Image (cartoon, grey):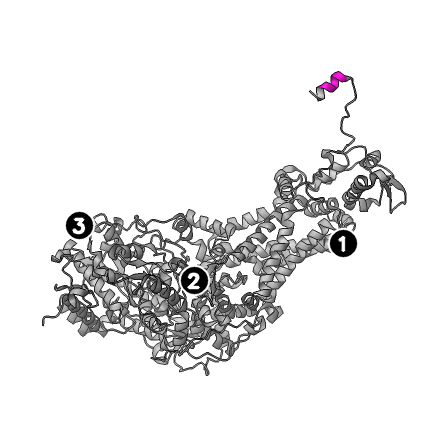
């Protein structure tokens, strides 16, 4: 073999590049890491496996229902799995899933996705301000 | 000489890929090179395998086990040359090279695209050296090696002038010249050599130069040059040949000894050397043994190139020179720049070693102190191009020039392909030309410098039987020349390449462009004032072609 | 069952073929000698000090090691040679810059790079910050739901443009082999199936990552358990990608590694300063032809024209030159 001084480093760089996950995960000590979710008992709005892959579509439909048809009572969602009716709102989710951190974030962080839903919408972990008289209010509107 | 083709019709064909894998059966008139005769390739000094049989392309008379030999030679090539192997493997057929080849532009033959040319041998490579080719055959772009395929390989291997223009544009630097060069070597192993180049190779192996000039003939030619110079300048000039103890060995392509317009360049060399000797005492010698700068072996194979260029370092050592100056030639400078010191051991004589420890011309001739070559050259190589040399002299004001003597010329400069793309000598000739003449114009940007078009006759294709191909291949260059002729009134096409100087006069005549051909050193010779001999700038009455310099007075 | 084959067995085989194949090719190329130093010079050489070189010359006609590295980097990351592309027009006897191929190639390759970086989220735990940031930047986050990854669409566009070249331009059609179309179709199938999975038929990405994380630590039992529960559309994408990996080392796609080896680009143009030694002709004191070459069992030796032979052949003429003291002067008339 000629030009060993270039070819061997090249092969090493190739291996290091291709097997990045190994040394990266080794440094992070996360080999075979699988997130643990706090799954509430009982049925979800739809089939659980379907929900795992498609919940964002459901939420998107609910959003449309709420914005476009909410005033006409269009926020009623008929589940195709159970046939039950649900109020199309994220609050419906929070009825069972009590914590965003222990449920949603587990997977989202795992695959590195940050939905912007919760920039505005309510989650159970938000600390709600309680009305404590005008003094406190003026703190917010100074 | 073969008749010039009456008219050229460029028919572009775009067959489908299956067609491309089928060997061509019909060979176009004027594109097929003759195969060597035994006297060229079975000579004592140049013995090629199976050279003892007279063949022609319709009856190849290949040795019995030719297929085995071919594949064996190919396997050897793959091991011996990484470039060949790699270029077999990594082409993606993007087509960037296709319209860069002057032969493709001129002929429209799809197999003359650089990628098409390489595919001819690549398809054989796939069939015999890769798994996918063995399994999927045609569908993997592979094909059997048959006699028809060998014919086709020969036909197209000798339609490439090894100019490397495709290599410049290829995203992976795939050099068709390299593929074709080594393919020719493979073909020579089963007895197929091209006649034109082997005539020259054999002559050079036997006598030291391509023309087969004997020592007396060469000395006589130079002498005649000196006589002509006496007529032009009125001075008794001289030069040395085979002289031991000279400072510099000068090596020119052998075309310079006889042919026109090479001849005028030769006169330019002689004027420069005389001025240097008379003024500074720098002696330059020619050599009859190393009388050939050009090297047709570089068109044939590594081994042939080595056989021919091995003489020069030996001669430098024998004569005890300090360094070597090379003349104006194209492929010579690919050989002398990239090949020669790999193919040979550099000289080891004392003078050589001493000079290259401190490569200042002042060490040889005190008056030239300051002219140094160590910024890019060393004793492991020791060659300086005559135009680099001249440029250095001009820059250090060591020679006196009178630009106005070239006022009757309006020149343009053609970069020889191997000088531009195998060496990178681009600005030096322009520097020299701007200093020796007032009227110098560039051809369009896409056709000069590293993008220069080949003259269509390099790589061993200067043969007369392929005149049609030559006139087609030179077309892009001629169109560029016509452009400057019309725009600036250019009347001379300068090129430091012996093959160009042989090809362009025919081409210019064929393409009806009424301009002359010459070399930069001719212009230097015109402009050079021989101050050491007491010449004044206005003394010279005639240029090197014998034309009166001052038309009004002359008439 | 399908999940086990496509989700566990196939990727293991594909990765093994890819890694071994690529290393094999590297070593295979490295095993061939480089007899000559043959850079293609694309600019002014380094020569006399007063001949100025521009920055382009330094990279197109490199003299030092660093300039050569610079040339290679420009070649690999900018496709510099393609950027020089021109097109010759026969009818107009003129030429123009034609950089479409460069544009398409850059579009495809850089999209591919972005896509690959984004995919690292399925292998790395935790997902690196810059991967997330890159995804958010190229997705124009907040404009569409689900956010649209530009690179994912650009790669399809780039591939289509490259393929349409091969179909509609006559020259390119002529020189395209089935394998050229195949590579493009394969890449198109992978990228399109990936986009379909993203925008239309969703797959459970958490499971996908779980599968890959388990495959990586060779926890085959867990991988098998997960494999069967992932949606089929994922396997379309996954199997095609596995196939690409296995196909890669033995196809023209290997140009990715080969470009590093090309002698016309990765060698400096310093022949005159540093001698290159040919490994199979390291002592060239006698030319190979004079030693003799053996073909088909027969040896062919050319006689070497050394000075003594030369002198014995042309003694008279050489002596005549010696008599005139090696000097040539015009004849006295």
Label 3 sits on residue: B367
Q: Bounds of the magenta span? A: A134-138
Quick check: is C1 in the magenta stretch? no
Q: Is residue B144 above or below residue C150?
A: below
Question: What's the CA distance linking mark 1 and mark 2?
Answer: 50 Å
Depicted C91 relative to depicted B389: above or below: below
- Looking at the rendered structure, whether the residues under marks 1 and 2 are on a common chain is answered as no
State how far apart marks 3 and 2 are (Cα).
Answer: 42 Å
Measure the alpha-carbon separation of dots 1 and 3.
86 Å
The tag earlier along the polypeptide, 3 or 2, is 2
Tell which tag, 1 or 2, sits nearer the viewer: 2
Residue position for label 1:
C232
Residue B165 shows which numbered tag?
A: 2
Q: Are marks 3 and 2 in contact (CB under 8 Å)?
A: no
Helix, strand or loop status at disc 2: helix
Q: Which structural element holds mark 3?
A: helix
Badge 2: chain ID? B
Dot 2: few (<14), some (14–19), or many (≥20) neighbours within 10 Å?
A: many
Name the mark nearer the viewer: 3 or 2: 2
- Residue at the top extreme, as displayed: A135
């Amino acid at each position: 073999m000629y030009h060993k001084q270039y070819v061997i480093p090249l092969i090493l760089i190739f291996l290091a590049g291709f097997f990045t996950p190994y040394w990266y995960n080794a440094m992070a000590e996360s080999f075979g890491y699988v997130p643990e979710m706090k799954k509430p008992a009982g049925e979800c709005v739809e089939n659980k496996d379907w929900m795992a892959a498609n919940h964002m579509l459901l939420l998107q439909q609910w959003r449309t229902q709420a914005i476009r048809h909410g005033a006409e009572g269009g926020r009623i969602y008929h589940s195709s799995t159970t046939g039950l009716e649900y109020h199309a709102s994220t609050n419906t989710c929070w009825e069972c899933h009590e914590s965003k951190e222990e449920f949603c974030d587990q997977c989202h962080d795992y695959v590195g996705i940050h939905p912007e839903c919760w920039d505005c919408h309510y989650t159970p972990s938000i600390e709600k301000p309680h009305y404590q008289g005008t003094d406190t209010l003026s703190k917010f509107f100074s | 000489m073969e008749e010039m083709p009456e008219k050229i019709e460029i028919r572009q064909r775009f067959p489908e890929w299956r067609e491309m894998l089928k060997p061509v059966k019909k060979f176009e008139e004027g594109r097929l090179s003759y195969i060597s005769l035994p006297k060229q390739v079975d000579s004592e000094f140049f013995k090629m395998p199976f050279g003892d049989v007279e063949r022609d392309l319709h009856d190849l008379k290949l040795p019995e086990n030719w297929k085995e030999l071919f594949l064996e030679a190919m396997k050897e090539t793959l091991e011996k040359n990484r470039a060949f192997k790699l270029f077999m493997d990594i082409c993606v057929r993007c087509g960037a090279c296709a319209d860069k080849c002057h032969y493709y532009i001129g002929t429209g033959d799809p197999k003359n695209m650089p990628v098409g040319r390489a595919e001819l041998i690549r398809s054989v490579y796939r069939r015999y050296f890769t798994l996918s080719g063995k399994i999927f055959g045609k569908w993997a772009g592979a094909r059997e090696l048959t006699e028809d395929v060998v014919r086709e390989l020969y036909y197209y291997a000798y339609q490439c002038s090894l100019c490397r223009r495709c290599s410049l544009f290829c995203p992976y630097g795939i050099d068709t010249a390299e593929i074709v060069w080594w393919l020719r070597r493979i073909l020579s192993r089963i007895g197929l050599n091209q006649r034109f180049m082997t005539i020259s190779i054999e002559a050079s192996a036997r006598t030291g130069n391509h023309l087969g000039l004997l020592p007396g003939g060469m000395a006589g030619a130079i002498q005649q040059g000196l006589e002509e110079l006496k007529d032009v300048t009125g001075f008794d000039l001289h030069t040395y040949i085979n002289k031991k103890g000279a400072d510099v060995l000068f090596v020119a392509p052998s075309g310079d000894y006889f042919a026109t317009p090479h001849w005028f360049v030769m006169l330019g060399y002689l004027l420069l050397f005389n001025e240097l000797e008379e003024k500074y005492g720098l002696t330059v010698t020619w050599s009859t043994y190393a009388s050939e700068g050009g090297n047709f072996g570089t068109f044939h194979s590594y081994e042939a190139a080595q056989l021919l260029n091995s003489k020069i370092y030996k001669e430098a050592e024998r004569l005890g020179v300090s360094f070597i100056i090379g003349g104006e030639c194209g492929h010579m400078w690919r050989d002398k720049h990239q090949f020669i010191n790999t193919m040979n051991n550099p000289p080891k004589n004392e003078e050589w070693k001493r000079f290259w420890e401190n490569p200042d011309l002042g060490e040889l001739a005190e008056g030239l102190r300051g002219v140094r070559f160590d910024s890019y050259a060393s004793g492991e190589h020791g060659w300086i191009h005559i135009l680099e040399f001249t440029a250095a002299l001009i820059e250090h004001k060591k020679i006196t020039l009178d630009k106005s003597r070239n006022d009757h010329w309006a020149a343009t400069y053609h970069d020889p392909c191997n000088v531009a793309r195998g060496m990178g000598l681009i600005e030096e000739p322009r520097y020299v030309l701007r200093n020796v003449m007032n009227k110098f114009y560039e051809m369009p940007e896409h056709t000069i410098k590293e993008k220069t078009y080949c003259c269509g006759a390099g790589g061993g294709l200067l043969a007369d039987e392929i005149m049609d191909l030559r006139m087609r291949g030179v077309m892009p260059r001629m169109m560029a020349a016509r452009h400057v002729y019309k725009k600036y009134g250019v009347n001379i096409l300068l090129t430091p390449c012996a093959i160009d100087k042989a090809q362009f006069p025919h081409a210019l005549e064929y393409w009806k462009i009424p301009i002359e051909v010459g070399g930069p050193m001719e212009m230097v010779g015109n402009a050079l004032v021989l101050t050491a001999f007491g010449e004044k700038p206005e003394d010279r009455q005639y240029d090197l072609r014998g034309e009166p310099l001052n038309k009004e007075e002359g008439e | 069952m399908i999940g086990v084959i496509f989700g566990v067995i196939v990727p293991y085989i594909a990765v093994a073929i890819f890694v071994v194949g690529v290393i094999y090719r590297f070593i295979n190329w490295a095993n061939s000698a480089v007899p000559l130093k043959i850079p293609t010079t694309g600019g002014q050489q380094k020569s006399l000090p007063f001949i100025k070189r521009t920055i382009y010359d330094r990279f197109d006609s490199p003299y030092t090691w660093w300039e050569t590295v610079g040339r290679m980097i420009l070649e690999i990351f900018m496709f510099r040679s393609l950027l020089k592309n021109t097109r010759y027009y026969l009818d107009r006897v003129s030429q123009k810059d034609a950089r479409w191929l460069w544009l398409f190639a850059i579009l495809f390759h850089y999209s591919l790079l972005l896509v690959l970086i984004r995919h690292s989220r399925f292998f790395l735990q935790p997902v690196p910050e810059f991967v997330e940031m890159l995804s958010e930047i190229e997705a124009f986050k907040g404009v569409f739901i689900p956010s649209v990854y530009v690179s994912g669409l650009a790669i399809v566009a780039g591939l289509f443009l490259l393929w349409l070249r091969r179909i509609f331009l006559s020259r390119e059609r002529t020189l395209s082999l089935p394998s050229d179309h195949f590579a493009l179709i394969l890449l198109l199938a992978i990228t399109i199936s990936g986009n379909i999975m993203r925008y239309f038929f969703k797959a459970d990405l958490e499971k996908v990552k779980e599968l890959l994380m388990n495959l990586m630590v060779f926890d085959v039992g867990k991988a098998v358990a997960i494999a069967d529960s992932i949606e089929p559309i994922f396997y379309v994408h996954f199997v095609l990608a596995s196939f690409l990996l296995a196909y890669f080392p033995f196809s023209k796609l290997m140009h990715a590694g080969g470009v590093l080896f090309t002698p016309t680009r990765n060698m400096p143009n310093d022949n005159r300063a540093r001698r290159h030694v040919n490994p199979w002709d390291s002592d060239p004191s006698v030319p190979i032809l004079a030693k003799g070459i053996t073909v088909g069992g027969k040896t062919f030796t050319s006689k070497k024209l050394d000075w003594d032979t030369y002198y014995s052949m042309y003694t008279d003429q050489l002596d005549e030159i010696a008599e005139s003291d090696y000097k040539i002067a015009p004849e006295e008339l």
